[in-house]
């Protein structure tokens, strides 16, 4: 039987801490949803939508600029409460980028976890990660009016300008 070194114990504790943070983060949207008639996947910003209900598409590119900034184009978009959008992404940059949308507080909490665990992989319905040259999409129903945020939470990207706003108007 192999004896665990101090480094192995530290790594194990880091992994346990990361798993605990992920479990708390995963439970937070469900707890915040209350006891109303919400979908299991519903977040403050809405829920995954059905492709057939999307009447509008928003094309979003992810890239880096010559001066070192990282950007989304467009850096903001609007929706109406109850509207289902097809968000189509193209990473025309030279590095991986991701798009995560939620309330600003949740974005900043997720960003903090990503800074501690940069290799963390996740499969959230409100997020997509793309390698250079790849395309992808999210079909999303914006169930609540309000101001929401999006960003690339890969360490350093948000600070380099890769963030934006979503304004969801009341019906």
Image (tube, grey):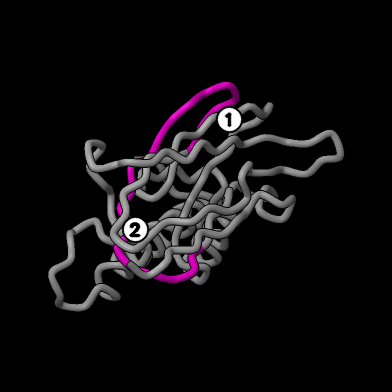
* Quarter of the figure with the N terminus: top left
The crowd level at tag 1 (other Cα within 10 Å; few <14, some 14-19, many 20+) is many
Q: Nearer the viewer, residue 152 or 81?
A: 81
* 64 part of magenta stretch: no
**Horizontal side of residue 60 vs 47, given as left or right:** right
Q: Residue at x 45, y 49 (%)?
A: 4
| Residue 92 coordinates in the image, percent (x, y) | 63, 27
The crowd level at tag 2 (other Cα within 10 Å; few <14, some 14-19, many 20+) is many
Question: Quadrant of the rendered structure where residue 45 is?
Answer: bottom left
By secondary structure, the bulk of the magenta-drawn segment is best described as: strand
| Residue 160 coordinates in the image, percent (x, y) | 74, 50
Q: In the image, which residues are magenta?
A: 129-148
Q: Single out the residue that lies furthest toward the right.
A: 67
Residue named by callout 1 = 91
Q: Quick check: 43 above or below 124?
A: below
Question: Quadrant of the rendered structure where residue 139 is?
Answer: top left
Residue named by callout 2 = 142
Q: Quick check: 80 above or below 145?
A: above
What kind of element bears circle 2?
Answer: loop
What kind of element bears circle 1?
Answer: strand
* Quarter of the figure with the C terminus: bottom left
| Residue 59 coordinates in the image, percent (x, y) | 51, 36
**Of callouts 2 and 1, the N-terminal one:** 1
Q: Residue at x 26, y 47 (%)?
A: 49
Q: Residue at x 36, y 45 (%)?
A: 85
| Residue 20 coordinates in the image, percent (x, y) | 37, 64
Q: Nearer the viewer, residue 75 or 156?
A: 75
Q: Are marks 2 and 1 in contact (CB under 8 Å)?
A: no
**Horizontal side of residue 21 vs 68, given as left or right:** left
Q: Nearer the viewer, mark 2 or mark 1?
A: 2
């Amino acid at each position: 039987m192999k004896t665990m070194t101090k480094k192995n114990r530290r790594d194990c504790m880091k992994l346990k801490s990361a798993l605990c943070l992920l479990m708390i983060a995963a439970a937070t949207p469900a707890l915040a949803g209350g006891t109303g008639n919400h979908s299991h996947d519903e977040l403050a910003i809405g829920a995954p939508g059905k492709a057939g209900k999307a009447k509008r598409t928003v094309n979003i590119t992810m890239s880096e600029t010559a001066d070192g900034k990282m950007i989304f184009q467009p850096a903001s978009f609007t929706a109406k409460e109850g509207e289902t959008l097809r968000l189509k992404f193209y990473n025309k940059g030279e590095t991986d980028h991701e798009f995560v949308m939620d309330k600003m507080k949740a974005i900043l909490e997720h960003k903090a976890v990503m800074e501690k665990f940069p290799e963390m992989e996740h499969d959230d319905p409100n997020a997509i990660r793309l390698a250079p040259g790849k395309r992808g999409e999210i079909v999303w129903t914006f169930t609540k009016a309000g101001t929401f945020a999006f960003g690339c939470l890969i360490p350093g990207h948000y600070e380099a300008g890769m963030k934006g706003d979503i304004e969801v108007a009341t019906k």
